[in-house]
Amino acid sequence: MHSDCGNHHQRDLEHWLRRARVVPILTLDEETDAEPVADALVSGGVRCLEVTLRTTSGLAALRRLRRRFPELVLAAGTVRSIEDYHGAIDAGADFAVSPGSSPSLLQYGVTASIPLLPGIATPTELLNGFDLGYRGFKFFPAVASGGLAMARSLLGPFAEAWLVPTGGIKGEDAAVWLKEPNVAAIGGTWLVPEDRIAARDWPGLEKLAAETLRSLE
């Protein structure tokens, strides 16, 4: 980005995501589910977790997780406005993730106290972010937007960029995506199936996380 602070942010973000490899994306109706779900995922080896702001429980869940898991890299997902961004910062998120990339969000993310992973699906959106100094992008919705072939095409003119593909990716596809050098990590909901959360199947969640990460070694 334009500032040293921004460049530092981008490097931190890439480091966190390449280390994590997979980012479970969690949407919670009940904030009290946050700790047991995260406990299971962390026990299974997960190092980064995204909590979406799609429900009214999102920010409260983030605050609970920040207190309970100081070492876990926490993302606030579905950040669509500056107000959402402020909420993410106040809740203790390490970075914000947007489904798209509005000019106001991109501009704010350059100087915000936590980095932004902006959502893109087209070369124009990628270029808009690139102009402001962004190098990392959420490729969303990845499968519906053309999958791996589209990701490779997007990166052709932007060799310095890296992506976190999200949307429609399943566990069995993870290794194929992560073989791409410019794919830092993949995001997905498959690690946090709604039926397992509803059934309070915490051992099942832990096993799913551990098996997924083991398959990527």
Image (tube, rainbow, N blue to C red):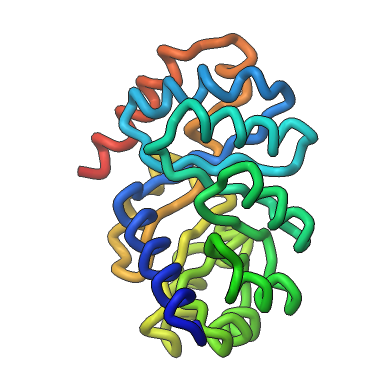
**Residue occupying the point 71% across, 49% down:** 87
Q: Position of residue 216 (x, y in %)?
A: 26, 44
Of 72 and 127, the residue lying toward us: 72
Q: Position of residue 118 (x, y in %)?
A: 60, 67
Q: Position of residue 151 (x, y in %)?
A: 47, 71
Left or right: 204 in relation to 132: left
**Residue occupying the point 42% across, 61% down:** 13
- Visible in this render: residue 138? no
**Residue occupying the point 44% across, 21% down:** 39
Picture quadrant of residue 63: top right
Relative to 5, is 74 above or below? above
Relative to 49, is 155 above or below? below
Of 129 and 150, the residue lying toward us: 129
Relative to 207, is 46 above or below? below
- Which quadrant: the C terminus? top left
**Residue occupying the point 43% across, 15% down:** 204
Left or right: 14 in relation to 33: left
Picture quadrant of residue 114: bottom right
Q: Position of residue 71 (x, y in %)?
A: 37, 38
- Visible in this render: residue 79? yes
Q: State how many labels appear.
A: 0
